[in-house]
Amino acid sequence: MRLKFESRLLIFFTIIFPAISGELPRFREAPAFRNGRECPKATWSALDRRSHNPSIIHISMTLDSTYLRGSVAGVFSVLQHATCPENIVFHFISTQRQRLELSRTITATFPYLNFEIYRFDTNLVKGKISYSIRQALDQPLNYARIYLADLLPLTVSRIIYFDSDLIVVDDVAKLWSINLRGRVLGAPEYCHANFTNYFTSKFWSNPVFSGTVKGRRPCYFNTGVMVIDLRKWREGRYTEKLEYWMRVQKKYRIYELGSLPPFLLVFAGDVEGVEHRWNQHGLGGDNLEGLCRNLHPGPVSLLHWSGKGKPWLRIDSKKPCPLDSLWAPYDLFRHKSLFSDS
């Protein structure tokens, strides 16, 4: 009797906490999404060394066991609303530990998806990460976005970066086609936000540090949705510039958040503004409590559950926020029966 109870308890934790049990979540197979008649025929391969094909949309996301359910929902939402889904290539970034298993999961869930998985060497950020206000922000993979230009093939000259806690409810080609006007990075900006709140008094009291934003009109932007010119990034050696601020942070503690502040210090004031509809962020609440929030005023093309509260966790705990119901239709997670008579 005790053995049977312990067995059921193990099954319970495997289902509810797959990342802890070591088993990846399982998902239903997504339907095949085909191009519309107006779509140009385009193919892409990581082995193809030819020049950039403008008909191909390149999207990068990270993959790990903790956020896999969110990543799968994000991919599903992109494909479902795309006019030319077969012209989309996903570039997933993962650590070595579960890379093979993650690849199998993506293939089983999206048999027709064109994707590559690249290994992120966590040693790249070893000794550079400082603890922040939320443990999830301190994970090495959270910093992989800094290294996209090094991880992806040189033939990928432009990339959309998406976090793993969002869904797209519009044709992603509209975001892909924005004019960066010679800038390295495009993202929705929020100039009403108090920029000074993102840095400590040590930063503002040091003229060398605070002088970095002098002469600029820095605005907050969320790094969970970015369009990046990788050629200009490589030419400008922006990875090194971001790493510089990570080293400064390690020594002087000039901010409290994770990978966001270095981006603000390097790019704020020189970002090509994107319509706010492309990042309705903050739906996960703040970084401490993750309370429910409403949408910002205006149209919506992308919903982003940045913050502590994630829709799949709130749904599973039977305590969803109202807007979590908008995420649920894209959830391909295959629920198991907790207990059986066998």
Image (cartoon, rainbow, N blue to C red):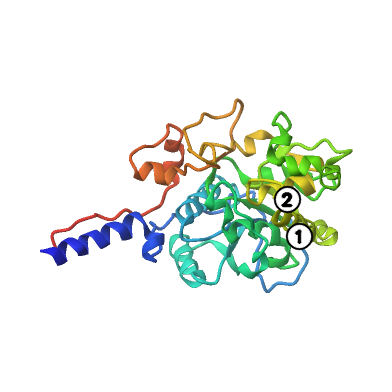
Secondary-structure class at tag 2:
helix
Percent of width and height locating residue 165: 52, 47
Q: Amino acid at mark 1?
A: Thr
Residue drawn at x 80%, y 40% is 205
Residue 240 quadrant: bottom right
- Residue 133 vs 325, above or below: the answer is below
Residue drawn at x 67%, y 67% is 124
Percent of width and height locating residue 322: 43, 31
Secondary-structure class at tag 1:
helix
Residue placed most toward the observer, 127 or 110: 127
Residue drawn at x 69%, y 50% is 253
- 222 to the left or right of 113: right
Percent of width and height locating residue 333: 38, 53
User: In which quadrant will I find the C terminus?
Assistant: bottom left
Residue 151 quadrant: bottom right
Percent of width and height locating residue 296: 59, 28
Q: Amino acid at mark 2?
A: Pro
Q: Which residue is mark 2?
A: 262
Q: Which mark is residue 239?
A: 1
Q: Is residue 257 visible?
A: yes
- Residue 308 vs 150, above or below: the answer is above
